[in-house]
């Protein structure tokens, strides 16, 4: 196996599962962005063949951290793509953001089983990824807890009888905040997710509900249902991870504690199930399971994602790139929390030719770069220091 993004939140959970049963796995490559110390420690622990850091400036540090081992060190985006091209049967795609698209596509094109956490890759280039998997005979296994839940209860032989998907959302840390309070929200407050411990970018996306918007697009691409058959319901306890509704009125749900090692274990063991260390649900201790509709007035990102999906073409690349740039600007306090969605909306509204069909990775990269540039401009205009 190979883990793209091994030093992140999903990556570390994957490493934890593999380290519990080292005899069952052979690790080909581990890939990180720039955290070389943790990467080297993981590579030693899992006896990986290759460790790659995307940031070329960190090559020497990685080499030094691996001194005395036979683990090969490499750096730079080409080395990341090469790591994905090695013949690992199973690849965890857990790089955050658009940066994960290129290596994920490489793994999909050579027929690997791709455990997909990196939702941005699918949102931006869904057609390319799905076609790659179809041509190569590979597989995409959803790791995002909602899509993994749906995958577990989606009966492919009953496809015609499925009349809706129900994605659950925790509502994030600002579920009950007023707009006025949200306007002053700090990165620390936005990062404090009530239920899940995740990387910074997805935590902010959970606070704006852009995460649910990206997941809506992801669900459409993975399961082929139109947007109007994908419902979003806020379920603050995050016990039900998502549901599938059938034409007879039955609803099948997957439940569990809030531990990403559950969906990762499912993807690791697929098509079998393997033992997992996650805490078991104790139903006698569950106070209540509650549900409410999302508030699109306070969380406009959801609607922006619906519009991107309806537009098709390059629109979701524009949505995603502008969001990545705006989230990064918010995290360093350059813009306010509510500005994130405003910046994204401005870039989307000003984009001509969004319906252009996506044909190649290069085309996606050009659109991504340009949308980031425009979002940067938008962030500058809204800069808090002005
Ligand atoms: N965390 C969750 O519970 C969760 C749940 C569902 C889905 N997801 C999805 O899974 C993906 C990862 O999320 P996360 O929370 O694990 O993120 P994270 O903690 O920020 O980790 C991101 C990983 O990507 C690496 N990375 C960053 N830029 C890179 C680049 N240019 N090339 C190669 N590697 C790079 C990071 O390396 P460094 O450590 O060196 O920066 C790190 O290993 C996201 O798409 C997210 O939406 C996450």
Image (cartoon, rainbow, N blue to C red):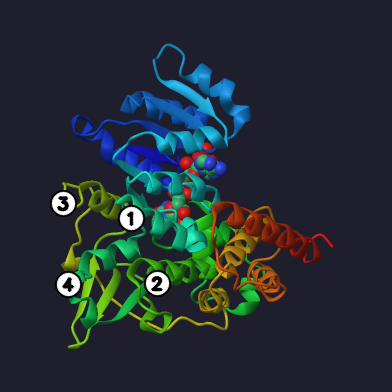
Dots 1 and 4: beta carbons under 8 Å? no
Disc 1 designates what residue?
140
Q: Position of residue 370 (x, y in %)?
A: 70, 58
Disc 2 designates what residue?
220
Relative to 102, say whether 7 is above or below. above
Q: How many residues crowd mark 1 within 10 Å: few (<14), some (14–19), many (20+)? A: some
Query: Which marked residue is nearer to the observer: mark 1 or mark 3?
Result: 1
- What's the CA distance linking mark 2 and mark 4? 18 Å
Disc 3 designates what residue?
273
Relative to 218, say whether 309 is above or below. below
Most foreground residue, 166 or 93: 93
Q: How many residues crowd mark 3 within 10 Å: few (<14), some (14–19), many (20+)? A: few
Query: Which marked residue is nearer to the observer: mark 2 or mark 4?
Result: 4
135 displayed left or right of 25 = right
Question: Circle 1 sits in a helix, a strand or a loop, which is it?
Answer: strand
Q: Quadrant of the C terminus?
A: bottom right
- What's the CA distance linking mark 1 and mark 2? 14 Å
Q: Position of residue 324 (x, y in %)?
A: 60, 58
Disc 4 designates what residue?
157
Hey, which residue is sitting farthest right in the picture? 386
Most foreground residue, 313 or 100: 313
Dots 2 and 3: beta carbons under 8 Å? no
Disc with the residue nearer the chain's start (2 vs 4) = 4
At a point 45% along the width and 63% down the height, the residue shown is: 127
5 displayed left or right of 155 = right
Disc with the residue nearer the chain's start (1 vs 4) = 1
Q: How many residues crowd mark 2 within 10 Å: few (<14), some (14–19), many (20+)? A: some
At a point 58% along the width and 78% down the height, the residue shown is: 300
Picture quadrant of residue 286: bottom left
- What's the CA distance linking mark 2 and mark 3? 26 Å
- What's the CA distance linking mark 1 and mark 3? 17 Å
Residue 25 seen by the camera:
yes
């Amino acid at each position: 196996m190979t883990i793209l993004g091994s030093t992140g939140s999903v990556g570390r959970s994957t490493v934890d599962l593999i380290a519990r049963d080292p005899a069952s796995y052979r690790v080909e490559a581990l890939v990180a962005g720039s955290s070389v110390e943790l990467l080297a420690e993981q590579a030693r622990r899992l006896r990986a063949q290759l460790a790659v850091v995307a940031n070329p400036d960190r090559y020497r540090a990685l080499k030094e951290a691996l001194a005395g081992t036979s683990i090969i060190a490499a750096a730079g985006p080409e080395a990341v793509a090469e790591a994905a091209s090695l013949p690992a049967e199973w690849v965890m795609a857990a790089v955050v953001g658009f940066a994960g698209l290129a290596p994920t596509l490489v793994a999909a094109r050579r027929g690997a089983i791709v455990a997909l956490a990196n939702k941005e890759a699918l949102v931006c280039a869904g057609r390319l990824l799905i076609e790659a998997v179809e041509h190569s005979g590979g597989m995409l296994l959803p790791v995002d807890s909602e899509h993994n839940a749906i995958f577990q209860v989606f009966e492919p032989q009953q496809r015609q009888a499925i009349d809706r998907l129900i994605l659950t959302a925790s509502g994030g840390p600002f579920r009950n905040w007023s707009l006025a309070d949200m306007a002053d929200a700090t990165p620390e407050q936005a990062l404090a997710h009530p239920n899940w411990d995740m990387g910074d970018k997805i935590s902010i996306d959970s606070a704006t509900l852009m995460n649910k918007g990206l997941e809506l697009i992801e669900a459409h691409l993975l399961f082929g249902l139109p947007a109007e058959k994908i419902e979003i319901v806020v379920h603050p306890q995050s016990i039900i991870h998502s549901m599938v509704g059938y034409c007879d009125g039955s609803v099948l749900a997957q439940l569990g504690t809030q531990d990403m090692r559950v969906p990762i274990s499912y993807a690791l063991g697929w098509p079998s199930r393997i033992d997992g260390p996650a805490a078991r649900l104790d139903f006698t201790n569950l106070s209540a399971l509650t549900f409410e509709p999302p508030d699109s007035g306070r969380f406009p990102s959801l609607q922006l994602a619906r519009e991107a999906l309806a537009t098709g073409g390059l629109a979701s690349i524009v949505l995603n790139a502008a969001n990545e740039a705006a989230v990064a600007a918010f995290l360093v306090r350059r813009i306010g929390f509510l500005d994130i969605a405003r910046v994204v909306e401005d870039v989307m509204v000003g984009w001509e030719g969004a319906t252009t069909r996506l044909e190649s990775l290069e085309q996606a990269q050009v659109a991504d770069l340009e949308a980031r540039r425009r979002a940067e401009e938008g962030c500058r205009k809204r800069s808090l220091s002005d």
